[in-house]
Image (spheres, rainbow, N blue to C red):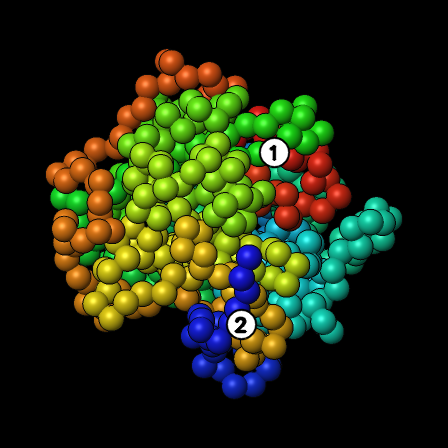
Amino acid sequence: MKFVGLAILAGVFSSCALADTPSTDGLQNTDCISSSSSSSSSSLYAAKVEVKHAKLFSIDYHDTYKVVNNLSTNTTYVLYQCGSNKPTVEDADAFIPIPVGSAAAWSTSAAMFIEALGVQDRVKNLGTAPSIVSACLQELLEDVIKPFDEGNATSTDEQEQSNDVVFNMPAGEDLNATNTVLSSEYLESSALGRSEWIKFFAAFFNAEERANDAFDSIDSNYACFAKKADEEYDDLRPVVAWTSYAAPTEYNNNTAYWQISFADYKYDIVRDAGARMLNTTGAQATMFSSAPPFLDALEDVDIVIDESFVGYSYDELLKNYGIKDASKSSYSWVSASRVFRPDRLQSTAGGLDWFEAPVAFADALLQDLIGVVHPKFVKDGYQPIWFRNLADNEPVVVVAAANCTNMYAQREDPAKSCSSLSFQEANPDDSVYDGVDENQTEDLIYDLSKSEIINESGAGSDTSGSFQLAAVTIGTSCVVALAGLFAAL
């Protein structure tokens, strides 16, 4: 596997800020209030968030406190302004003074939302530190932020209790701690819904203004990309399949399986990118017990996006998929060399940015997928951020702390401004569209009735890549989470 430096994507990580100092711009009520002012009838929170796309959280505002609900886990967090009287709210899971002065995060996506808000100066501890790809979080981990001592439960407990709040996943550790907050962004059914969780995290830091500004920009930029893709590519939509292979291990009863994912957010973004999704009978994910029926399902697919955790080269993928000779293959995704992996950006330890920035920046994810589906959509060319063409042996890009320009700056959206780009209409005669059926807009339906499958998961059960996400974010409970999530995918 080839590696290159970050210079070719320097713009993705650049910051306009020049000094390594935290800013308070866009933060409200950064100071505590006196208990006597708690009875004031005027609300402290002029800046509020309104949830537009996310389905799994809500926030209600009161004069001196907020009620934040994770609707997926049915957990409620009461955030009250420090110095004010603790409010009375029934059935709350935690009461947390805000703005929080210290925070910890177990998941890489939570860490990314915190950086997107520019409040990483409050972070004391992070989980799975080697997997973090963000250059500035890497730099902070060198001297400021301490990694969780994941091999020592007692030490980890002490680290967690030293923070005002610990952001975790529903499959994580110490979920009953009084300062634990569960986030479920990875379970959202749309890419924009996932990114809107920046508002969830903002509530804990009184950073609603920053969250609104960031998400409004993402939302409008996403809409622009989706509109242009629909206008230019409605009659020429390649079929995309999200696939993976799991080698035999002790965690899957030493039985290999092949999987096709149909997660809702993938449907959402594939369609918005001007493509069609391989579909089955309404399932969210299908696991095959052998390669032949798996390949049968991919017979009419134009583009394969492989999410395996084994086989990082094209030759390895072909071997794992049971394709002995690519030159004799009848699959268009092989003959047209349209096999991709979302692992272009990595940490030196092999952590994938795929589980960080794309969750927070839906517009950049859509832009990247359009670049995969319609590689000539920009007249001047486009270099993907996360996807690399495995068939073309494209290299990965390793991100290091040295690439950080300001470790306390808000993480910038890596997407280009859609309105500034000139889209190029697709040419059906271009070789990149060889085998693509024209004038087809509906998903490709594959009948599973003749297939030997292990599991066909129902709607909502595919965790949209959370198997991979959990594997790199939940520390010492990783094995437990893997066992449970194998069944869900």
What is the x, y in percent for residue 10? Answer: 46, 75
* Residue that badge 2 annotates: 5
Residue 460 drawn above or below residue 433: above
The residue nearer to you, when weighing 244 against 442, is 244
What is the x, y in percent for residue 290? Answer: 51, 23
Asked whether the viewer can see residue 318, the reply is yes
CA distance for labels 2 and 1 = 30 Å
* Residue that badge 1 annotates: 247
Q: Is residue 193 left or right of residue 120?
A: left
The residue nearer to you, when weighing 489 against 23, is 489
What is the x, y in percent for residue 380? Answer: 24, 71
Report which quarter residue 266 is drawn in: top left
What is the x, y in percent for residue 430? Answer: 18, 53
Q: Does label 2 or label 1 sit earlier along the sequence? A: 2
The residue nearer to you, when weighing 291 against 327, is 327
Query: SS at mark 1?
Result: loop
Say which residue appears at 68% left-offset and 31% top-offset.
249
Asked whether the viewer can see residue 42, the reply is no
Hey, what amino acid is under mark 1?
Ala
Hey, what amino acid is under mark 2?
Gly
